[in-house]
Image (tube, helix red, strand yellow):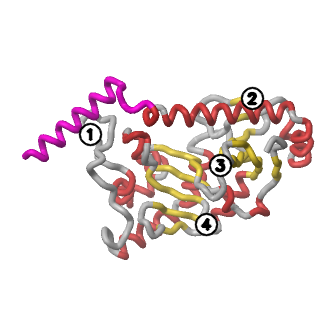
């Protein structure tokens, strides 16, 4: 009974902190800071493309349409970050050998758009979604996810999970790079590598090349049981973090730029200030 009272007290305290806005500011503002940094990176690339003649010369050789007009940031839920009205670009910061986020969304949204995943809904819910506290805004951190391991599931169950995910591979990859129902899709992915908190390299991939490469591989469950990985560079997993907010239950797809084949790079530019 004491444990029950303590759990209720913890829920009340957690919800009270959310309502009053007294959560540790660093953790509470992490997502906002990430979004702002991403926005600033887009601003930088817009200005860089529009004004750096050396880089513009290289872009023209890559694609004549890429400089038909000046670039601007594009607001909204599309996967295009910046555009010149003809060519859409997606901008991502990254670090060497480290996964970076491509996409995140609630599991119900994923399943709504890829109905075949209903067959393994319970396994994905167990992997991604912790129960919410009574306030509906925070996850119950006293609970744990159910990993995709032999301790929790049979060989047949794990085989079925991987089979269905691979059957929906195309749609999952498309979701990560293009989202759902977006008429306008980015053509190129700009990866800005950071070292020692400074921009080092800018590498450009054609997104259709990445998708085609990933399609040749099969999803596998990593030994940890928490990550479903493709080609050693693309992964599906629980978002986590977010100071325990319910958004930590989101399904996240991630990419390691540095693990993509180097012959897929369309253009590499080394920033002169590095």
In the rendering, at what x and y percent does residue 260 appear? 69, 61
Which residue is the site of mark 1?
A: 133
Cα–Cα span, label 3 and label 4:
18 Å
Q: Which residue is mark 2?
A: 72
Relative to 169, say whether 156 is above or below.
below
State the SS at label 3: strand
The residue at which mark 3 appears reads as: 94
Does the magenta segment cover residue 12?
Answer: yes
Q: Gap in Å between the C-alphas at discs 1 and 3?
A: 34 Å
Screen quadrant of the C terminus: top right
Q: Which residues are magenta?
A: 1-25
Mark toward the start of the polypeptide (1 vs 3): 3
Q: Secondary structure at mark 4?
A: loop
Q: Position of residue 99 (x, y in %)?
A: 58, 54
Disc 1 and disc 4: Cα gap in Å? 37 Å
Query: Disc 1 and disc 2: Cα gap in Å?
Result: 42 Å
Label 4 or label 2, whichever comes before in sequence order: 2
Q: Residue furthest bottom?
A: 155
Going from N to C along the chain, the mark reached first, 3 or 4, is 3
Label ID, residue 231: 4
Callout 2: 10 Å neighbours few (<14), some, many (20+)? some
In this image, 245 relative to 256: left or right? left
Residue at point 29%, 42% (across, down): 132
Q: Are marks 4 and 2 in contact (CB under 8 Å)?
A: no
Q: Residue furthest front?
A: 196
């Amino acid at each position: 009974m004491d444990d029950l009272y303590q759990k209720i007290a913890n829920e009340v305290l957690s919800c009270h902190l959310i309502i009053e806005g007294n959560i540790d500011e660093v953790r509470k503002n992490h997502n906002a800071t990430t979004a702002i940094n991403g926005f600033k990176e887009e601003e930088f690339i817009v200005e860089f493309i529009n004004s750096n003649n050396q880089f513009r010369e290289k872009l023209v050789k890559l694609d004549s349409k890429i400089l038909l007009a000046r670039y601007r940031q594009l607001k909204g839920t599309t996967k295009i970050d910046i555009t010149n009205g003809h060519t859409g670009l997606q901008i991502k910061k990254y670090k060497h050998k480290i996964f970076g986020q491509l996409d995140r969304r609630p599991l119900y949204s994923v399943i709504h758009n890829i109905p075949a995943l209903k067959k393994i809904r319970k396994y994905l819910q167990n992997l991604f979604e912790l129960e919410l506290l009574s306030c509906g805004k925070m996850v119950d951190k006293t609970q744990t996810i159910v990993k995709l391991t032999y301790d929790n599931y049979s060989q047949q169950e794990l085989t079925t999970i991987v089979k269905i995910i691979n059957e929906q591979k195309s749609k999952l990859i498309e979701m990560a790079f293009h989202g759902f129902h977006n008429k306008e899709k980015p053509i190129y992915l700009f990866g800005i590598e950071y070292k020692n908190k400074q921009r080092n390299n800018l590498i450009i991939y054609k997104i259709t090349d990445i998708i085609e490469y990933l399609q040749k591989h099969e999803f596998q469950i990593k030994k940890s049981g928490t990550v479903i990985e493709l080609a050693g560079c693309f992964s599906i997993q629980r978002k986590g973090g977010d100071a325990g907010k319910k958004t930590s239950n989101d399904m996240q797809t991630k990419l390691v730029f540095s693990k993509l084949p180097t012959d897929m790079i369309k253009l590499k530019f080394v920033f002169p200030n590095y």
